[in-house]
Image (tube, rainbow, N blue to C red):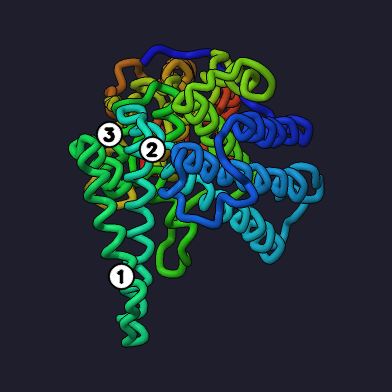
Amino acid sequence: MQKVKDRKIELTPEIMDHFSGLLISSCQQIRSQLNYDEEKGDLIAPYLHKDCKSTYFYKVLNEVEKTSMCLKSYQKEFISNPEVSKDKVQDASSKRILTNIYSSFIDNQSLWIRKLIEIFVDLTLFTKCNKIDYYRHYLLCKEIEFYNRIDDDFKNFYSCKNLNIEETLKRYKNVLEKIETKIDLKIAINLKKTLKNKFPLALNLSDDLQQAVLGCSYLNVFGRASSFIHANIGNNLREVVDKERAETNFKHTLFLSMLVILKADELLNFNIEKGAIKRIREILNTDSYRGGFINEISKPDIKVGDIVVAYYDLAEVKVIFEKFGNRAFKVKYISSPPVPGILEDCFPANYIDLVIKKEKVDEISKELKKILADSGETMDIAEDKLLEIRNKRLIKTFKLFSNNQIRQITGVEVKKTIQALGINSEIKKPDAV
C-alpha cells in the first residue's frame, strides 16, 4: 500500500461546527435544484412522483441533515464541555458513569453510521443504473417491502387479515411487473439484495477513501454498528469507550455524510462547483485529510517486526495481508496468549495498535547485549534466551508506560526502562517477570 500524507483532524468546537454547517448547506444546495414539491411531496407514494429520482434524493438529504444535527449535539455536549474528561475522575463509580456517557453517544452515532452505510452502498450501485426507471423500481420495492411487513405483523400478532393491504400489494405487484419490462433485472436485482450481499459489490466500485469509510468488511462497520444499537447484555465487546473513540465515530460519520453528498451530486449530474459542496470536494480530495482518515483505518505505518497490541495482547507482526485496500496482520504473541496453545493469530487493522517500531525493538536487543557485556556475561548467549529476555523487557516497558492507554512508546522511554529496571536479575532468574 502506498503511504498517503497524514493530517490528523483535530476536532475543536470550531472545526466541528464548521463541518456540521457544511453538511446542512450542501444539502440545501442540492435541494434547490431538485424537482420536488416540499408542501405536497409527502402526500403521495415516492414511486408515483413523475420525477421519482428527485424524490429519492430528497429523502437521502433528509438523512444527511438529521446526521448533521446529531453531530452538532455531540459538539455541544462533549467537545465544548471541558469537564467531560476521564482525567478529572478517579473513583470507579465516576469512571463508569463517564464511560456510559460516551457509550450513549457512540450508540447514537452507530445508528447514523449504519444508515449512511446503507445509503452510500445503494448510491454506489446506482452508478451502474442511473436512470429514472431504476429509481422507480427501487422505491416501489421499498413500498412493497413496507406493506409486507405490516401484513405479516397483522397476521402474526393480531390474527387480523386486512383486505386493503392485500389489495394494495396486488396493485403494487402489477405496477412492478410493468416497470420491470423497462429495465435490466440483472442489474436492478443488486439493489434488492441484502446489505451483506450488496456490500462487496459496492466495495469493488469504490476508491481507496470510499473503501476506508465503508470499513472494508460488512462486520467491521455494519455488524459493529448493529452491536452498539442492540442491547449489550451477554456480549463483552472489550471495546475501548472514551473520548477518542467517540471522536473517531464523529469523523467516520462526517466522512460518510460528505461522501453521500458528493455521490448524490454526481448521480444527479448537477456538478456543483461552488459553496459548501466545493469545500467538501476540496476536503475529500486534499491528500492530507484523505490520507489522515485512510491511515487511521488501514494503519500503513505498521510493518513486519513491529510490536503491537492485538486485541489487548502484546504481539509481534509476522505477516501482512491486504484486500480491498484493507490490511490484516498475522502476529505472534509476546505476552501470554489469550487462548493457551494458540501462539499466533490474525487480526484486521482495526484490532491492531502500534506500540513499538521494529527499529526501537532492535535498539532494545542492542542495549541488552551491551548490558550483558558490561556485566561480564558471555556474548555468545543463545539467541532464544536473548529473545526471551527482550520480550520480558517489552512487556515491562508496555506495562510501565502505557498507563492503561494504548499508545506508541518512544526510543527514549525504551532506553530509560531498560536502564532503570535492570537486566542482571533476569539473566540469573530467566523465569522472573
Few, some or many residues within 10 Å of mark 2 (<14, 14–19, 20+):
many
Alpha carbon distance from label 2 to label 1? 32 Å
Q: Is residue 361 left or right of residue 152?
A: right
Taking 138 as reference, is 329 above or below it?
Answer: above
Please give the residue where the numbered disc 3 appears in the rendered image: 201
| Whether residue 237 is visible | yes
**Quarter of the C terminus within the rendering:** top left
The quadrant holding residue 172 is bottom left
Q: Nearer the viewer, residue 97 or 293?
A: 293
Q: Nearer the viewer, residue 238 or 333?
A: 238
Residue carrying label 1: 167
Q: Amino acid at mark 3?
A: Leu
Q: Earlier in the sequence, mark 1 or mark 3?
A: 1
| Residue with the mark numbered 2 | 121
* Classed neighbour count for the residue bearing mark 1: other residues with Cα under 10 Å, few (<14), some (14–19), many (≥20): few
> Residue sitting at 64 percent across and 53 percent down?
102
